[in-house]
Image (spheres, helix red, strand yellow):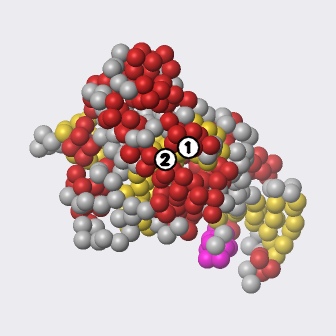
């Protein structure tokens, strides 16, 4: 039993030392980018009532949630998705605000995936939600911000695929598919399963032009030309509006100078059924899963009591870390801690020195020297824990300054360090 307690449950992991520091650095970089776009922070609880994420909300399946009970017998869940929680807050705290609300967040989500999927069950998300803005400008700004965040994290090669749920919805509504058939078709298209799509569509008595669009749907991805191609394939009003919206978003992204990072996928769908318009996913080399997801959800907040437009973006920090590692993109760690090494007889001088440096913004570690260890032992220790320098108090006035990065040692007076 004691051995089991040393390990983590399946699907979660410890993050420590340099990896943890790198993760925090990345999160801070991207968070600062969101702040530059005018977003303000919000925090929601790690667990909420089950009803916040129930099936009618369009979030993940019930059997993929971690559920438990409180003392009153209410069913609670660890949040599997940030968006419904933010939607609840919007309806509660911003009910009377009609102009745009910009909120960003950082936290863990918990999804009870099958053990065969090999995915983390707890992942860190950094995201943002733009409420009360139904414009093309809002769509483009959120996508632009997502790209800028990934660039700020250090990625040089990345691609955002953009789709629109209205294209698929318009076609299947006109074709008269039933709800169960739509779900089967959705799954086949998401998997790019051409044979599965063909089997489902061929069994339906629908217009030849609709069949052609549905047959081609898994292949309707590429650059701007795919929009023109799709536009000629259908006269469905909802599908046409979706294509026009995507074109407008693309034109605005070009104004941001980010058009080269964008491709289109008209067969893009999502397991989150609350999306109502533009949806997008970001990819890079080194990971098959999306590192950023997002989309417009204009009908979700109204389920909590406020009828308003909304669009969100979520960056999966763990996937981003994997991609950076596999692309050998280093996140520079700042070894800016300094170790003051002193004998107990000079404790007072060490405390004075540490207080002076801390008041001037330096990170100071204090350690009473153990005579059983040599200076070389302490230098090796400093390397292991990523400490940038050592101040060895020779006496109450003389200090040996060791620069670990450059392997330089100097002897200085304490009075020269404290001005």
On screen, 210 above or below 103?
above
- Lower sequence index among marks 2 and 1: 1
- Quarter the N terminus occupies: top left
| Cα separation between marks 2 and 1 | 6 Å
Identify the main secondary structure in magenta. helix
Left or right? Give the position of 396 relative to 68. right
| Tag 1 secondary structure | helix
Quarter of the picture containing the C terminus is: bottom right
Question: Where is mark 1, residue-wise?
Answer: 227
Numbered label attached to residue 243: 2
**Observer-nearest of 98 and 313:** 98
**Crowding near the residue tagged with mark 2, few <14, some 14–19, many ≥20 C-alpha atoms within 10 Å:** many
- Residue 20 in the image: state x and y as whole percent: 58, 47
Depicted 373 relative to depicted 92: above or below? above
Task: Tell me residue 187's x, y (percent).
Answer: 41, 26
Q: Which residues are magenta?
A: 347-360
Mark 2 element type: helix
Q: Residue at x 24, y 60 (%)?
A: 306
């Amino acid at each position: 039993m004691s051995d089991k307690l040393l390990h983590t449950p399946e699907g979660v992991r410890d993050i420590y030392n340099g990896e943890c520091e790198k993760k925090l650095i990345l999160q801070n970089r991207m968070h600062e980018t969101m702040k530059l776009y005018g977003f303000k922070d919000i925090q929601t609880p790690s667990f909420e009532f089950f009803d916040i994420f129930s099936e009618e909300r369009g979030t993940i399946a019930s059997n993929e949630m971690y559920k438990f009970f409180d003392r009153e017998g209410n069913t609670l869940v660890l949040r599997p998705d940030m968006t419904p929680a933010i939607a609840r807050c919007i309806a509660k705290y911003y009910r009377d605000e009609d102009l745009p609300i910009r909120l960003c967040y950082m936290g863990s989500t918990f999804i009870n995936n099958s053990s065969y999927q090999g995915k983390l069950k707890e992942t860190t998300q950094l995201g943002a939600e733009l409420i009360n803005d139904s414009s093309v400008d809002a769509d483009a700004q959120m996508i632009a911000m997502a790209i800028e965040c990934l660039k700020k994290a250090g990625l040089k090669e990345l691609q955002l695929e953009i789709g629109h749920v209205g294209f698929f919805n318009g076609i299947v509504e006109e074709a008269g598919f039933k709800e169960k058939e739509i779900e089967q078709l959705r799954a086949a298209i998401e998997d790019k399963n051409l044979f599965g799509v063909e089997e489902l569509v061929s069994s339906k008595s629908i217009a030849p032009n609709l069949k052609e669009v549905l047959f081609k749907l898994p292949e309707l991805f590429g650059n701007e030309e795919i929009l023109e191609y799709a536009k000629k394939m259908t006269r469905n009003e909802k599908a046409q509006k979706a294509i026009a919206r995507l074109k407008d978003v693309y034109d605005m992204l070009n104004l941001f100078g980010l058009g080269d990072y964008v491709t289109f996928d008209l067969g893009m769908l999502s397991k989150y059924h609350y999306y109502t318009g533009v949806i997008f996913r970001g990819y890079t080399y080194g990971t098959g899963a999306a590192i950023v997801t997002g989309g417009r959800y204009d009908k979700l907040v109204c389920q909590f009591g406020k009828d308003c437009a909304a669009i969100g973006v979520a960056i999966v920090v763990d996937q981003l870390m994997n991609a950076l590692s596999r692309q050998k993109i280093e996140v520079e760690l700042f070894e800016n801690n300094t170790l003051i090494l002193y004998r107990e007889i000079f404790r007072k001088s060490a405390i004075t020195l540490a207080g002076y440096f801390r008041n001037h913004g330096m990170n100071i570690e204090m350690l009473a020297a153990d005579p059983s260890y040599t200076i070389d032992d302490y230098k090796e220790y400093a390397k292991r824990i990523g400490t940038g320098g050592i101040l060895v108090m020779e006496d109450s006035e003389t200090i040996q300054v060791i620069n670990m990065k450059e392997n330089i040692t100097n002897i200085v007076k304490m009075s020269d360090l404290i001005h």
